[in-house]
Image (tube, rainbow, N blue to C red):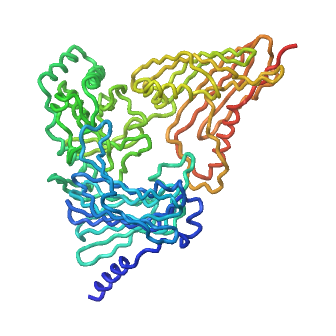
Amino acid sequence: MYKIFLFFFICFFEKAVAQNYDVALVNDSLKKGANAVKRFEEVKVIIKSPSKAIIKRKYAITILNEDGAEFARYINSYDKFFSLENIDGRLFNASGKEIKSVKKKDIADFSANGDASLMTDNRYKRHSFYWAQYPYTVEYEDEQYLDGLLFLPSWNPIDLDCSVELSKFIVEAPSDYLVRYKQIAYNNPPLKTTLKDVSVYTWQLNNCIAVKQEIYQPHWDEINPAVYLAPSTFEIDNYKGDMNSWQGLGKFVSNLNNDRQALPDAVKQDVHTLTNNISNTKEKINILYNYLQKNTRYISVQLGIGGWQTFDAKYVAKNKYGDCKALSNYMVSLLKEINIPAKYVIVNAGKEKKGLWEDFPVNRFNHAIICVPVQKDTIWLECTSQIESPGYMGSFTGNRKALLIDDDGGHIVNTPTYKAKDNIQIRKVNATINEEGTLVAETNTRFTGIQQETVHSLFHGATPEQKKNYLNSILSLPTYSVEKFEYKETKGIIPVMDEYLSITAHSYATISGKRLFVMPNFFNRSNDRFVEDKDRKYDVQFHSGYVDIDSIQIKIPVNYSIEAIPKSVNLKTDYGNYSISFALKENSLSVIRKSELNEGRFPKKEYEAIANYFNEIYKADRGRIVLVKKE
């Protein structure tokens, strides 16, 4: 009885004593190099059952300067399964005196509908005090009630440029319920206590100085303290599931989307008309993928369990649209009609995203694609794009682990990997420079794999203004004009974009008396200039490799000769290779440049050597040639 009394006394005492947010109390080491300081944070997850949970949040952040103002804004989301209630907030001046509090009418409420969303029940609430007398402190708290445990919150106490005084993550659950968690960069086990039939897990972080972005650092969720939660058994919208294994989670998704592949008779007829006279399986797949692209478009519809349950194939056929789930299911249905088995796959998509953790089944997926096993090969299809090549995943869903959904549950698979040899840029330049220093150049560039993605998106979907901005930024010259440009696309597993440009650049060469100063590598100069960093905190990671090859021919004025020419450079390392050479033949200057970056992770002790390598490239790319007028 005494222990119970003491427990409630401590809890009451902690709540009763107001926090002192005087900025003078913050340790100077936490202010140094920071834009904000997280004074206090507590995230409490109370699991009531496999279908019910409560999330209570309270935090206070001191804003030190204008760059830290982003931390002062409150925002949180809600939907059918996540209610959002009891929002409260207060504003404190530098000495910790309260000067404002949140009023209900001041909390803005918005729909999360985006341009690509037709209908969604996702909404969010937002508030800001719009204060600019630095430093100041904001304090917010709220509660969320979860109707289903398909999603549980994570603890991510570290933000860029924000120090942490104290952050806590507390999970309460019935003692007979398995609490599953994965710790990242947090070495100690949680503090676990049990009171009656409730187990309590606590993680805590104290006095952590602000983290700075480092060039070529590993993914954020690999290197900073975090805890991810996942349910064991769960229930949502009367659907029950088991997340103790990837197979179990896959079984839940399979059951959720079962019996949704029946096609209308008209679509069946289209499928057979297009493919009956085709014998090659891959060609059939490409034909039906093209049919999908021409007859449907991506629109997000996220209502209730519809955020995870696909619309059936007849819905897509009738409406000519669907989200990633519906379009992927529709493509599986098209292929099924001609007895080509295809598999629905869920993935964590995005250029900066990572794949699943093999050792920790958790629902962190945001996208659906499909794969089609073909003999010893597999064809992957992005079903939301009307312009993508069949088989190409690229930087959005490639190079990661995903979950294939089959009748017996989920299976971990690897999406296509794109190595340096797949991501190639080959450029040929033929140029002429006159005595006034004007350059006229014709360039042909071939981009493949990930290197073609920017040009591909500009070619297909950019506005004239976006194309203009791109063309005005691709050359390392102060002024130039693109007189003509053309593009050609070649679709394939590794897609290709060919670019032709005609360019005029006045004042390309600097004139000084009888000399012209020319920087011949005007297209592909490295911008990675490393600074000395003896306190490097993280390893160096190159997430994607590539190969660049530039061949430049520049005709110089006939009455000029070369007075000075840079030395050739040839660098070979574990992380990349680089070479550049200069040669003069008659009145034509030849420059051959090759740069290759290897994907990989390298220990931070190699940072100095890596920095030297890139700084050598930076310098070599800016080598100058001096032309002197003949007497």
Camera-nearest residue between 16 and 624: 16
The answer to whether residue 555 is above or below residue 308 is above
The residue lying furthest to the right in this view is: 631
Camera-nearest residue between 557 and 98: 98
The residue lying furthest to the left in this view is: 265
From this viewpoint, is residue 348 visible?
A: yes
Residue at 26% from the left image edge and 45% from the top image edge: 410
Position of residue 554 in the picture relative to residue 192 (left or right) = right
Residue at 28% from the left image edge and 84% from the top image edge: 4
Location of residue 40 by image quarter: bottom left
**Numbered disc total:** 0
Residue 597 at x, y percent in the picture: 57, 36
Residue at 68% from the left image edge and 22% from the top image edge: 591
Residue 443 at x, y percent in the picture: 58, 18
Instruction: Assign the C terminus to one quadrant of the image.
Output: top right
Residue 547 at x, y percent in the picture: 55, 30
Position of residue 554 in the picture relative to residue 39 (left or right) = right
From this viewpoint, is residue 361 visible?
A: no
Camera-nearest residue between 328 and 282: 328
The answer to whether residue 72 is above or below residue 257 is below
Residue 1 at x, y percent in the picture: 26, 88
The answer to whether residue 527 is above or below residue 47 is above
